[in-house]
Image (spheres, helix red, strand yellow):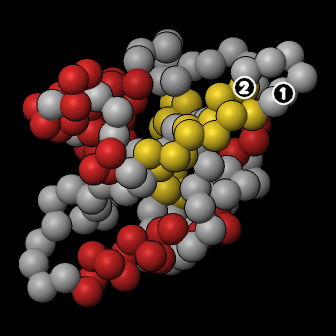
């Protein structure tokens, strides 16, 4: 939330799906729920990430969708960079894939390992194209 919400403008809609977690995480959303372009969907029972995403897709009003999970960190200005890139192209865009970093907590002392993956270097089984396509999409 700390990395995503400062990037939200009037042209970006945010749909939060609370999948019936029991950890009171939905309370973190309270300060954003009054905003015009923020929607909260709540599942009555834990349903799964697929169910929750499909539910959000059904009510989404935008042309593009970006799934952001609760443990994701969005780079500063990422939404504007992506939207500017889309708008600079002279054709419709179906999918955008970006580089990403993976953080792993490897010890009890919270030593964080960072792994950077570029789309064309994504580690796959046998480095086969069909595996790469499957993993990314």
Inspect this view and state whether residue 73 appears: yes
Say whether residue 100 is left or right of residue 74: left
- Which residue is at a point 28% across and 28% down the rendered structure image? 124
Specify the quadrant that holds the C terminus: top left
Name the secondary structure under disc 2. strand
Name the secondary structure under disc 1. loop
Q: Quarter-wise, where is residue 23 in the image?
A: top right
Q: Mark 1 to mark 2: distance in Å?
A: 6 Å
- Which residue is at a point 12% across and 85% down the rendered structure image? 90
**Quick one: which residue is furthest to the right in this view?**
109
Residue at mark 2: 105
Q: Quarter-wise, where is residue 53 in the image?
A: top left
Q: Quarter-wise, where is residue 75 in the image?
A: bottom right
Q: Nearer the viewer, residue 5 or 135?
A: 135
Q: Residues within 10 Å of mark 2 (few under 14, many from 20)?
A: few
Give yes or no for contact between labels 1 and 2 (Cβ–Cβ under 8 Å).
yes
| Residue 104 rendering spot, x and y as whole percentages | 65, 29
| Residue 57 rendering spot, x and y as whole percentages | 29, 44
Residue at mark 1: 110
| Residue 131 circle label | none
- Which residue is at a point 86% across and 16% down the rendered structure image? 108
């Amino acid at each position: 939330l700390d990395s995503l919400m400062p990037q939200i403008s009037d042209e970006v809609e945010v749909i939060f799906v609370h999948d019936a977690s029991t950890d009171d995480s939905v309370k973190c959303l309270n300060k954003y729920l009054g905003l015009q372009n923020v929607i909260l969907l709540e599942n009555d029972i834990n349903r799964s990430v697929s169910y929750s995403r499909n539910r959000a897709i059904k009510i989404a009003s935008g042309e593009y969708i970006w799934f952001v999970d609760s443990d994701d960190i969005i780079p500063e200005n990422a939404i504007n960079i992506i939207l500017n890139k889309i708008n600079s192209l002279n054709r419709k865009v179906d999918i955008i894939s970006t580089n990403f970093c993976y953080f792993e907590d490897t010890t009890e002392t919270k030593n964080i390992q960072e792994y950077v993956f570029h789309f064309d270097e994504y580690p796959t089984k046998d480095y086969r194209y069909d595996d790469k396509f499957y993993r990314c999409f």
